[in-house]
Amino acid sequence: CLTLLLFYAIMDQAEASFLLRCSFLLRNHYIGGIQMKNLFRIDSPFVQKMSLVFDLMLINILWLICCIPILTIGASTTAMHAAVYTLADDTTFFRVFRDSFVQSTLSMLLFAALATILCVDILGMQLLPESLCGILQALFWLGAFFLMLCSAHLPILLFRYENTLTNMWRNSVKIGWSALPITCLMAALDLLPWLLLWFCSNIFWFLGFLWMTLYFSASAYVNIRLFRRFIQPRIEPGN
């Protein structure tokens, strides 16, 4: 500051103003450099968020690869939720995939059987008289509602708690009913890609890169945050 005042005293006003502007530009550049340097520190919020995104991308790709055999979709989905739940442990995905394979696969087969019944119900609406369509439509929505209650929480319960498969499904329905708004939100996140495929296939294929790299693990991440925030406090350990 003393140097600038000295130059201001010996220079005319235009030269002094130019020098002051240059000093402010240098100062702002220096501060900006410090901010950019802090931005890429290992403990900065930006780096932490980017690390989370890369972890979710890796889990999403692992989930897709492990879903290729079709029969392993249930175990892969459970493992994805477990890996997102713990994030810090890279071995969680394959450990849970192995440990929960039987229960997850049986759950997936049961879920597929119920979904097949619903599809047959839809076909029956087109073949039967209109007087019976109302009954089939009611059964369809009742079955779809039941599957929604189960699908939202079942993958989390499978890796989080030890219980019989029957109790897992029963508890999933009870939890879904007791926290219905949260369950609907979780189910909507899970069903979004398939609803787009059914109703707006062009948008689905346009967003194909998102589905393959990030969406499903990110959806699991949001669902787990909702589960831990609103539902887990209501559950006693072991139930």
Image: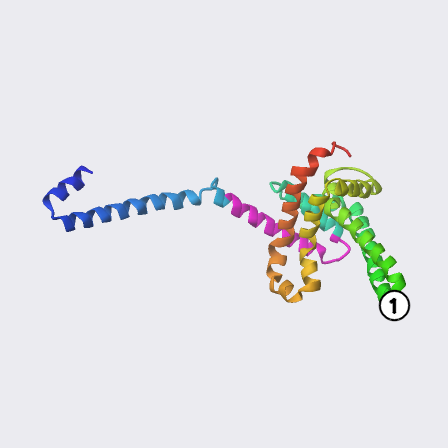
Q: What residue lies at 67% left-to-right and 58% top-to-bottom? A: 193
Q: Residue 156: where, in percent of width, then height? A: 72, 43
Q: What residue lies at 87% left-to-right and 68% top-to-bottom? A: 127
Does 62 lie within the magenta span?
A: yes
- Above or below for 124 versus 75: below
How many numbered badges does the structure rendering display? 1
Circle 1: is it few (<14), some (14-19), or many (20+) Cα within 10 Å?
few
Q: What residue lies at 82% left-to-right and 41% top-to-bottom? A: 170
Question: In the orientation shown, which residue stands out farthest toward the front?
Answer: 131
Q: Residue 228: where, in percent of width, then height? A: 66, 38
Q: What residue lies at 27% left-to-right and 48% top-to-bottom? A: 25
In the picture, which quadrant includes the C terminus? top right
Report the predominant secondary structure element of the magenta stretch: helix
Inspect this view and state whether residue 57 appears: yes
- Is 66 in front, or is 205? 205
Question: In the orientation shown, which residue stands out farthest toward the top?
Answer: 236
Q: Residue 173: where, in percent of width, then height? A: 79, 43
User: On the rendered structure, is 164 left or right of 188?
Assistant: right
- Is 9 in front, or is 80? 9
Inspect this view and state whether residue 92 appears: no
Q: Secondary structure at mark 1?
A: helix
Does 59 lie within the magenta span?
A: yes
Q: How is the image coloured?
A: rainbow
- Is 130 in front, or is 19? 130
Q: Which residue is mark 1?
A: 127
In the picture, which quadrant includes the N terminus? top left
User: On the rendered structure, is 139 left or right of 234?
Assistant: right
At label 1, the amino acid type is: Leu
Q: Residue 117: where, in percent of width, then height? A: 85, 58
User: On the rendered structure, is 167 left or right of 191?
Assistant: right
Q: Which residues are magenta?
A: 48-73
